[in-house]
Amino acid sequence: MKFLFFKRIWYSFTELTEVKISFQIFLRMLIPVSSFILFFQLFISKGELNKIIENYIVYSGAVDHKFFILYLTSGVSHIFISFFVISLFWNKLFDSYTDIKRRIIKKNFWIHLIIIVTLFQTVDILNCNLSIMSHDRIYYILSKSTTFEYLFTSIPGFAINGNTINLFYTFSIIPVVLIIFGLVVIILTCMNLGKDLSILFYQLENNISETKKIELQTRIESFHNYLFVLSFVLVTSTIATILFFQLPLICISDGEQYDSYKSTSYGMGICWGVIFTLTMLTMCYYPYVIIQKKLKKIMRDGEVSGNKELGDWLEKIGDNFLIYKNLQSLISVLSPTIIGLLANLF
């Protein structure tokens, strides 16, 4: 039974075009965050980082809940938007598949999710610098505050040789749920791109008639729609991330430490905005480039080269897949970074 399961998985990665394409897009998508993990590890001193975090003076009096309310609001918005997109992409992904193929695709979805969750969990367990900057420092400050200490009870918690081991904080439920929803949207985008590309390649390999133009136009335009929808989700994720970084500001006493923490959080907001932008760029790079290559190959064929109208149409379609010529796509890709740069307004 186990052999059959792995045989089907191997078949999906080697024989199903949509799975091969989606996995290539998925692997490229991991490059930006992996690069930032490596660079943070190489160029930031963990000792200095821990020293700075431990020196923050936590204010013990009454605090303004502004950022916490805004964080919860943005989090709920992100979940609702992501849930709607997940429902839409999930139904689209499995539309027109046979039962056997549907089961194979579902298994591949879980493989994608396990891979990316394992990556993030490994970074967290190894206590990498990006992990410390992105949530450990926030947790450390909030756990020292009387306002948030009730959210830092461990579930579950146990002791080894008198040392308490905390596996999961109550507060962690909020960011973990937000991250999972965002990751699922990204994975489903990769898989839908793989499916649509495989169908598009099949259609382009056949003669392009006038009746097929409309269908091809619609399918090609759908690639831009994936980018717009993913951008919208990642913008809500960026806003939630920025507000998450700002939470400890309500607990830190005014002065140099307050300014230091605020400027660091501003930098981290830009950092994750750039990561999300590069993630979208790497995800759309492969489909856009390979579509360009396919269209140029068709335009070199004898049948198309003698048909000026069809050649002009294909050239126009190809221009839509040059990001620098497509203002909407360019804005979509840059929007998380723009939001990060505007973080000081929060």
Image: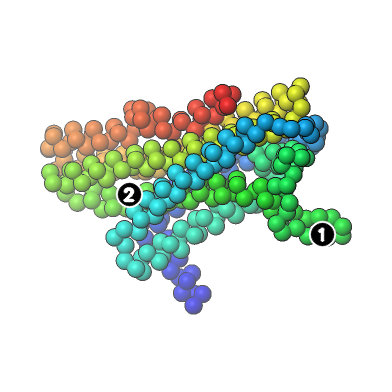
Note whether residue 176 is visible: yes
Residue 54 numbered tag: none
The residue under the point 19% across, 35% down is 313
Q: Earlier in the sequence, mark 1 or mark 2?
A: 1
**Between 147 and 240, the one nearer to me in the picture:** 147
Task: Give how far across and how far down residue 63 sits, in percent.
Answer: 71, 32
User: Which residue is under mark 2?
Assistant: 197
Q: Secondary structure at mark 2?
A: helix
Q: Secondary structure at mark 1?
A: strand
Task: Give how far across and how far down residue 144 sits, in percent.
Answer: 78, 40
Q: Quadrant of residue 260?
A: top right
Position of residue 244 in the picture relative to residue 83 (left or right) = right
Image coloring type: rainbow
**Quarter the C terminus occupies:** top right
The residue under the point 63% across, 41% down is 37
Disc 2 marks a residue whose amino acid type is Leu
The residue under the point 12% across, 38% down is 306
**Between 172 and 321, the one nearer to me in the picture:** 172
Q: Are marks 1 and 2 in contact (CB under 8 Å)?
A: no
Disc 1 marks a residue whose amino acid type is Ala
Q: Residues within 10 Å of mark 2 (few under 14, many from 20)?
A: many
User: Which residue is under mark 1?
Assistant: 159
